[in-house]
Amino acid sequence: MKRICPVFAAAFALLIGFPQSSSAYGGRGAGAALVLSETPPGRHGGAHGRAQGKGEEQAHSEHRAGPEKTWYLNRHDLAPDAAAYIVRPDGTVAEGKLEHGGNGWAFKVDTLPMDGTQDGIFTLYVVDRIVADNMLQIRVAKANMINHSCGWGHQFKFDKERHRPKSLAWIPLELVGNDLWDASFHSKTMSGDRIAWTVLDNGAASGNIPVTFTTASGWSRTVETDEDGTASVQLIRDYYPERWIDFDARKKNGLVITAVREYDEQGELDGQSYGTVRIVSTLAWKYQPARADYRSYAFGLGVTALVAVASGAGVYAYRGRRRKPFEEAEPDDEA
């Protein structure tokens, strides 16, 4: 099936909810991981989330480029020196400005100039550090953003660097996806696929790191990275509407990938000493139904339509054979 450059909905659901109030730093842990999202806190509508209301849509979405896009964090308890970083498609790095407002912590991504020179993948980070209970807690939230418009053409269609997710050597722990987009910057991840992600520790592949894959539908699987730092898992096929007519081949399901590393190390941050380091790194991703799923639905609809047509034709033919031809009766002269 030939794929075209559609206008996709930008928001995708996350399993990790957005709390309505901040929590103490001492309560931070694996359950308090930072996650980046295109949807403001409090508007996710539970585990599955919901789209922004009318008038809240962002000008920039997947395959509909705009001059800027706002990204949100799920937590309010950021350290004062938490920082956001933006790696542009051409490889340049800029620092994002984190601001706290009615929608919690957020920062804007500038995609200018709108001439196609920044056609490709933006890589976004938020890094947060704090010492609590003799532990240095580091949280890394990462996301990849497509900046593309079909009106720009596809000048980077065969540029492998534009299709390769970026990484930063000084990020303490990050997840890098493998083979995520096709030549036209369409996401290739589908349910049922075996996906692979590499964990980098300050730019170097790190083995024996637990990586958890969690979908918005509630499925979760944890695997460890191999000696090359790669963790792979086969995504569950979890989209089965009750009615065929409701099947949406472009539906985006949320996926959060989490890597955790903990080790002993003596040090000090902002005058506070620690003896243990715990790093929780996340990457928010999305996937859509496998082609086989909606092709089977289409096949089923086709069979149903064919049976309906054949049944109608059979009834029509049967009634035609039962119909007697009209004959005009001649009057009886003898009567």
Image (tube, rainbow, N blue to C red):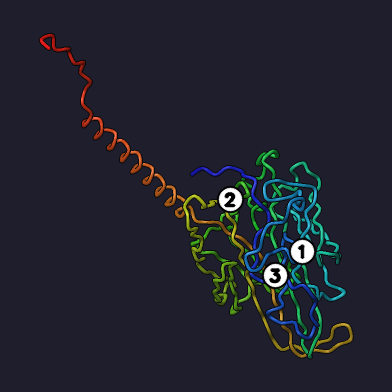
SS at mark 2? loop
Mark 2 residue type: Asp
292 or 109: nearer the viewer: 292
Reading the image, the residue beneath label 1 is 72
Q: Is residue 136 above or below residue 186?
A: below
Residue on which the image places disc 3? 203
For mark 1, give the secondary structure.
strand
> Quadrant of residue 202 in the image?
bottom right
Disc 2 or disc 1, which is closer to the eye?
1
Question: With respect to residue 21, does 120 lie above or below?
Answer: above
Alpha carbons under labels 2 and 3: distance apart: 25 Å
| Snapshot quadrant of residue 261 | bottom right
If you read the primary sequence from the N terminus, does the residue marked by circle 2 or circle 1 appear first? 1
- The residue under label 3 is which amino acid type? Gly
Q: Amino acid at mark 1?
A: Tyr
Q: Is residue 202 above or below residue 87?
A: below
Q: CA distance from mark 2 to mark 1?
A: 27 Å
Whole-angstrom CA distance, mark 3 to mark 1, is 25 Å
Q: Which residue is mark 2?
A: 182
Q: Position of residue 221 (x, y in %)?
A: 54, 74
Measuring 56% from the left and 67% from the top, which residue is drawn there? 217
The residue depicted at 69 percent of the width and 59 percent of the height is 144
Q: How many marks?
A: 3
Residue 81 position, x and y percent, is: 86, 73
Which tag, 2 or 3, sits closer to the chain's start?
Answer: 2
Instruction: Give the SS element for disc 3.
Output: loop
The foreground one among 89 and 62 is 62
